Image: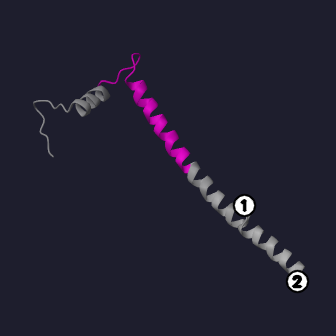
Amino acid sequence: MAALSVGFYFTFAAVQGNFGVFRRVQATAEKEALQAEHARLTAEVARMENLTRRLSDTYLDLDLLDERARNVLGLVRSDEIVVH
């Protein structure tokens, strides 16, 4: 009876313990979610670095500057039509 109890305990620990099968599946899913989040954030940082470089003192993208000024200040030219 003791051997059966010990066997049951180790089987349960192997499946649901801190280092068990379920924990491994959960850790793998968490790893994949974090890798996806890392890839998304890396792309966002690259995009922001590109925008920052395009508005820097050494390189000025006038189209981007015009777009940002219009967006932030809510400006339109007199020859444009705004549709809401």
What amino acid is found at the position of numbered circle 1 in the picture?
Asn
| Residue 18 badge | 1
- Magenta residue check for 65: no
The answer to whether residue 22 is left or right of residue 13 is left
Instruction: Spot the residue most to the left.
Output: 78
Q: For residue 54, which quarter of the picture?
A: top left
| Residue 1 badge | 2
Foreground residue, 81 or 68?
68
> What residue lies at 22% left-to-right and 30% top-to-bottom?
73
> What residue lies at 54% left-to-right and 45% top-to-bottom?
39
Find numbered disc 2 in the image and state the secondary structure of the residue it sits on: loop
> What residue lies at 72% left-to-right and 60% top-to-bottom?
18
Q: For residue 81, which quarter of the picture?
A: top left
Cα separation, mark 2 vs mark 1, equals: 26 Å
Q: Quadrant of the N terminus?
A: bottom right
- Label the magenta part by its dominant secondary structure: helix
Q: Which residues are magenta?
A: 36-62
Give residue 30's position: percent from left, percent from top: 60, 55
Foreground residue, 81 or 13?
13
